[in-house]
Image: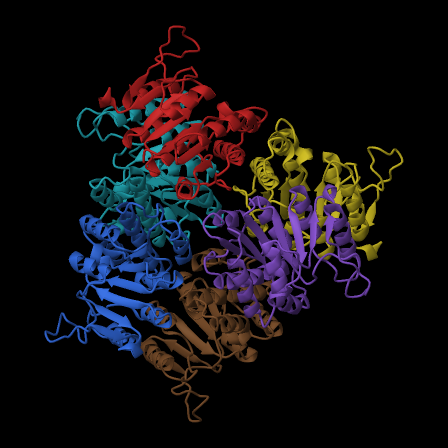
Chain colours: A yellow, B purple, C brown, D blue, E red, F cyan
């Protein structure tokens, strides 16, 4: 069990024009060098998703269809990512169940979204849960969970660790509020809580990620069991 | 547009031993008599889901697998429901997209859950959204949205209508709190809000449901646009 | 070849309210301890199937749809069983061919029914045949094949072994007659005969099953080649 | 209901080198001219199936795989048949459920076998049952049900009608015995019995078939409810 | 037959940042106003495909995977196009056969590519052929077929019509040579020839396209039977 | 990489009545004895395909449907071939992507065609490309590539090796011309060229094939990079 890991690779993290393939290549390199024997990776939609959705929303396209177009983009990114990791799945699974099955054949399994209404963070939490993996790394646009929006408040403080309930409360507040301080959506956090998945929120910095994969001290926030603190 | 409707038929509403087939038959009857030309129905898991999950959770079965076992139960209920409605789909679709496709062939399309992490209320909201249907009837264990848990507080007051944001706030409070006053989950409500789907929360009472289908005054709560009030 | 086994786990054998999860757990334990490297398990529908069918048949639901509802129940039982066996398939295959494919990835592959018109005993016989497995254990409500219905006749005698043709003749007589002495259906037996699959009919007794898995002497009936006797 | 019909077109009936396309064209013509609004057609494997199986069985190929190779042949024949009927399904469904779905879009739906262990006669009975069709025409190598093998006994007598149980008894006897007097397999007949499907056994003669489709007097045997005689 | 049309909408034609949604909206408008009762539309990959492939090819990604990434882009464009045409398919078919099936349910069916090794022009030719449609409009970056590359030679002459064999010879020459004068690939033209599909090559100009849909005189080249000239 | 090989087994090579199972058995034997750890095999349609197509084309059946009927035949041949190779896939994949996935589970993966418009030679080239295999053996009706049709010209000369472009030019000429000197279609060769797959064209002679599998000198033509000569 200890040998598995699931990583949610946020769309913003891999965006370029359209993707930052050099970054993806570096990311592949540190994964290959890591100790993990089963690695699940879920990629976000990034620039491609955003640009389609922005153009089509102006024409009043159905929000559910926009979600699905975004999912297509996550799968393009997933196939791109997989094409840069030797030993990964040659085709992108469309469901979490199929991905879990592939994790018994390939060391690295990359997937994107599954269906409208689920973020790729939620997909990652479900993949983690179904594959009985205990840790989920969420690589996102902030380097951890803060008590206030770090982009707006200089005195915002990053937590080293935080309990599930507190994280859900913070995420709820961020969703409702104005700021971009959303480190993970509520559904993903709720799944992590019910199956006691440790979530590590961190940024795209490759050196820092390498430390996390090694279990070394790194810039991040651990979200886990409230009682443990 | 006006001719479509989607109904979420809560598991508790159709439970018997294992299902209340007589109730389902009555429900079929009022639907057939209704004015709607395209009717989507999403059934919950009810007693069957609960009994499997309760037995297996004690043996520490993976929560994600429990969700999937629950989804199997929703599909048994869906096929049972469909078998009682002439002119409905002969097989149960596994995705919202397939269901929308079937809605172009059958007047009544019945489905259950889709994948772990989504309640059947959320599936119903997604089906409503994707099929460009404007109204979602949520038949559940309470007859509307209350300001307090009606089972515990005699002075609890049912709203006639309520805005999306207020409904989400109430649902969040109920989820977190102790009481069973959860009329609909947050994800379902969020989808309703983004696509301006009017949600009608009501109970299983057949006469009351018949009134709602006719557009007559009935016991229920309308959830819709905050600005409209 | 010698290292494979297929087991048909009759619905009545695993029924509880809804399932006898403790029994299933014990069954999983003896399988894990067994010598077999590839194990196929086909679960019946049991109590869940019976209760749905009984309620719906009264409302004249199509028999084919009732079969399919029963198949859903077999799959719920299959997923339940799989969730209790470490190293088994994470999702339930819907066809024998898919199951055979999974048998090259997982030591234990659990499935339920496939399509209306096939009992799970027949599915087990087909899985056995397609995977080139030589032995099929049929765990059912009787502990072997009798010359008369053992529940009605005190002097009924259990065979130690019996030829395929004789077994088919007995099964035909039982199907036509009144008694519940049906140890296996004719189609399943015919498949066993054409591919010379040895069938072991036995009861749910765990200690007895453990002996059978070890190749020790146990209460059961062997059905095999007529010439061999 | 009265407007549907299902036809099992035996492999021997359409065999040529490889198929008798002229016969199939004539068959298409009388179907198009018939009164039926929904027509299901299930084709057998014929010469193609027989020649593959005969060559491969000598090399001890798995019987289940031989069944599947036979099913491929039935689908080639199905697609051939469909290609000769304007207004039929453009692709061949692999399951009875998919075929029933297509019957709501196309007037003529042609399919072959579904999975090893089922004859195409059984598939036809299941299609009839699931689509709530009341009559199944079995076009086969004999022109009805006889009390003895008509090829061996000059005094064999064809029944005008016969009850289900009696037909099953005759089929059992034929299967066990030497003769080719098998007008329909036991599983197919059992399905017909449980859902009270009237089976009409008849030969490939086009003029005779045309009469049957019109409801006129023709050479055939009706198999139906035992009480009705 | 006369009432069907298939249109290949080249990737360059709908490219923007990422797509030219206004153009697609105009295109939808003239289609809706047209006389055709069944319309198949195949969209190319355009800017999105090109940008992914260009970034990944530099990293030596497998050409077959690049083809598949391009196909994902064609499907994003297809879903975008479909979302702008009322009465079109809600999900994008992945095979020509599925698309033909949908053409019996929806007036407009939009799809992208199918599998590596096939251009979307070839997919359009196959869709045209399988749906027994007699005309294929290829909307591309040139307004017809020229005897020389019109971008390089001022005296290049556009054909009003041209035979299949001559078109194939020109396309072969263009593929081999330097210029971008490829109006359609050889495989697509070969399919058109074998099934005598009339191909109309034209540019993205909406007014011109409208004329073509009406059967009026317009800037274009007809490719059809060599004998007909 | 060096350990993989893909083989296109032309339909004419395995034709008998209907197939030459003894030849296929010999072919299986030399493959099993070879050094390759991953072997992809694509079978053609042969006699079965030809006989169906010939009968149906006379009745003006849609060419696309004829292609699909031919593909069914290639899959019958594939399943026949697989049934004779221990350690091969138990079911036939319908897409190249599925086949590549199976190549991670089975040493031998056999498949037939995929969709109308692609020859099995092209499917083999795509399978080779997607699985990152460097060599494709094309077993066909000629024993190499000739400068003229060897059946018509006594002085025709077989190349030992030839560049991609030259091979494409020869193939184009053969397709257009009268002769049967088509060693491989243009699409297949173009895929080989873009991914620098070495193609070995050779005949069905088993001893000669065995030499090729061992890397020994044998009768054949190598098609590879133009610069390498």
In the picture, the quarter occupied by the N terminus of chain C is bottom left
Please provide percent x and percent y for residue D4.
33, 59
Residue at point 48% right, 50% down?
B102
Determine whether E211 is above or below E82 in the image. Answer: above
Residue at the limit of the structure toward the right, as seen here: A155
Residue at the limit of the structure toward the front, as seen here: B216
Please provide percent x and percent y for residue E101.
40, 44
Nearer the observer, A77 or E154? E154
Q: Is residue A122 left or right of residue B107?
A: right
Which of the 4 image quadrants contains residue E150? Answer: top left
Nearer the observer, E219 or E91? E219
Residue D61 visible in image? no
Residue at the limit of the structure toward the bottom, as seen here: C155
Residue C20 visible in image? yes
Please provide percent x and percent y for residue E228.
23, 22
Residue at point 29% right, 32% down?
E195
Image label count: 0
Residue at the limit of the structure toward the top, as seen here: E154
Nearer the observer, B137 or A52? B137
Please provide percent x and percent y for residue B182.
73, 58
In the picture, the quarter occupied by the C terminus of chain C is bottom left
Determine whether E110 is above or below D173 in the image. Answer: above
Nearer the observer, D147 or B192? B192
Q: Is residue A114 left or right of residue A13?
A: left
């Amino acid at each position: 069990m200890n040998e598995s890991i699931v990583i949610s690779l946020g769309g913003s993290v891999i965006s370029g024009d359209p993707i930052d393939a050099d970054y993806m290549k570096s990311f592949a390199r540190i994964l290959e060098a890591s100790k993990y024997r089963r690695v699940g990776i879920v990629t976000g939609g990034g620039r491609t998703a955003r640009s389609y959705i922005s153009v089509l929303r102006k024409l009043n396209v159905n929000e559910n269809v926009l979600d699905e177009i975004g999912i297509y983009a996550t799968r393009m990114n997933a196939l791109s990512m997989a094409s840069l990791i030797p030993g990964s799945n040659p085709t992108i699974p469309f469901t979490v169940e199929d991905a879990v099955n592939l994790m018994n054949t390939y060391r690295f399994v990359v997937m994107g979204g599954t269906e409208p209404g689920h973020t790729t963070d939620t997909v990652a939490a479900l993949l983690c849960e179904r594959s009985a993996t205990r840790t989920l790394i969420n690589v996102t646009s902030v380097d951890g969970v803060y008590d206030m929006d770090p982009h707006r408040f200089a005195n915002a403080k990053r937590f080293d660790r935080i309990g599930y309930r507190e994280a859900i409360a913070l995420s709820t507040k961020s969703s409702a509020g104005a700021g971009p301080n959303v480190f993970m959506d509520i559904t993903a956090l709720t799944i992590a809580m019910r199956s006691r998945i440790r979530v590590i929120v961190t940024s795209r910095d490759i050196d820092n990620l390498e430390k996390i994969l090694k279990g070394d001290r790194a810039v991040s926030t651990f979200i886990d069991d409230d009682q443990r603190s």
